[in-house]
Amino acid sequence: MSTKLKIKLSIADRVYPLTIDPSQEEGLRKAAKSIDVLIKQFEQSYSVRDKQDVLAMCALQFASQVEQKSIDNTTVNEHVEDKLNALNQLLSKHLQS
């Protein structure tokens, strides 16, 4: 039986109580801190009237980073697969000789 941990995270000046696995704590705290840092950057760079707008911009920023990493990983995987196929063909030719 896994012991749950009760924590409180502050995001955009609001406190969110959570019950989590202890292994999630570090990641959640880092994520909350990243969100708050990004909120401050957006508030300093743009004239934003509403926290909801800033939070939406944060969500878009983080979601676009995840999507871009997925696209990049797919490209890398395709490149590696092409190289492996070429190597496999070279090995097959060499072994048949």
Image: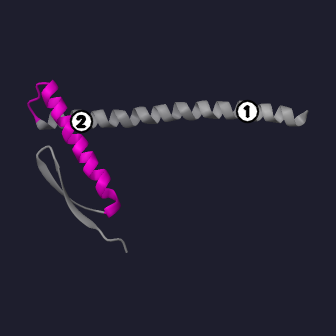
Quadrant in which residue 87 is drawn = top right
53 or 24, which lies in front? 24
> What amino acid is at disc 2?
Cys
Q: Is residue 52 left or right of residue 20?
A: left
Side (left or right) of 53 relative to 30: left
The residue that mark 1 highlights is: 87
Helix, strand or loop status at disc 2: helix
Q: Position of residue 93 (x, y in %)?
A: 84, 32
- The colour style of the image is one colour
Residues in magenta, as a range: 21-50
Residue holding disc 2? 58
Look at the numbered disc 1 and give the secondary structure of its residue. helix
Residue 67, image quadrant:
top left
Asked if residue 34 lies left or right of residue 75, the reply is left
| Residue 92 placement (x, y as % from top left) | 82, 35
Query: x and y percent of residue 64 in the render?
Result: 35, 33
For the residues marked 2 and 1, what is the alpha-carbon distance in whole angstroms?
43 Å
Which residue sits at x=65%, y=30%? 82
Residue in the picture at 43% in, 35% down: 69
**Quadrant holding the C terminus:** top right
User: Could you say which is closer to the camera, residue 54 or residue 30?
Assistant: 30
Type of amino acid at the residue the image marks with label 1: Leu
Residue at point 33%, 37% (across, down): 63
Furthest toward the right, the residue is 97
